[in-house]
Amino acid sequence: MQVKTMEKRIDQIKAEIARIGDMRPGSLNQQFTVCGRPNCRCVDPKKPKKHGPYYQLSYIHLGKSTSQFIQKEQVSTVREQLKNYKTFKALTAEWVDLALATAKEKLKAAKEQHKEAAQRLKKKNHGIESTGSRDTET
């Protein structure tokens, strides 16, 4: 891929990142529990009906594991934030890949330019030596 194409995609990625809304890392799990009270529907040996669903958000940030319960009313908001975070991570990973490829291509181009300049200089110096046409004062 050409450098200009990669740089254009990087600009697109930056614009996409700027449009991402609220985000958060982690995963959201649905849970059902058993309270253990006698005669409760959740401990029925034949057809237990557990309490719930309850939603639990779990994530690790700065090396610290965190877990919190999310109210049913907030589940769709949290899911959107989780989706936004995944989009952010994917876009930044692509950005880094493109940045590395761009840097590699630019270094390669600079090396080629340096090599060509050295060859031109060598040719120029060789031409002066072979003709013996140096200006000298007499």
Image: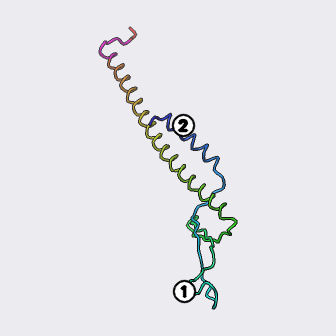
Q: Secondary structure at mark 1?
A: loop
Direction from residue 70 to residue 138 in the image, left or right: left
Residue 81 image offset from top left, x and y in percent:
63, 58
Position of residue 18 relative to residue 77, above or below, is above
On residue 8, the disc is: 2
Residue at 41% from the left image edge and 36% from the top image edge? 108
Q: For the residue marked with disc 2, what is the amino acid?
A: Lys
Residue 82 included in the magenta stretch of the image: no
Residue at 54% from the left image edge and 49% from the top image edge? 91
Position of residue 130 relative to residue 93, above or below, is above
Residue 130 included in the magenta stretch of the image: yes
- Mark sitting earlier along the chain (1/2): 2
Q: Is 2 in front, or is 74?
A: 74
Q: For the residue marked with disc 1, what is the amino acid?
A: Lys
Q: Is 72 in front, or is 22?
A: 72
- Segment colored magenta: 127-134
Residue 14 image offset from top left, x and y in percent:
59, 44
The N terminus lies in which quarter of the figure? top left
Direction from residue 5 to residue 108 in the image, left or right: left
Q: Quadrant of residue 65?
A: bottom right
Q: Secondary structure at mark 2?
A: helix
Residue 25 image offset from top left, x and y in percent:
59, 61
Disc 1 to disc 2, C-alpha distance = 63 Å
Residue at 62% from the left image edge and 70% from the top image edge? 55
Viewer-nearest of discs 1 and 2: 1
| Crowd class of label 1 (few under 14; some 14 to 19; many from 20; radius 10 Å) | few
Residue 105 image offset from top left, x and y in percent:
44, 37
Position of residue 78 relative to residue 136, above or below, is below
- Residue of label 1: 46
The C terminus lies in which quarter of the figure? top left
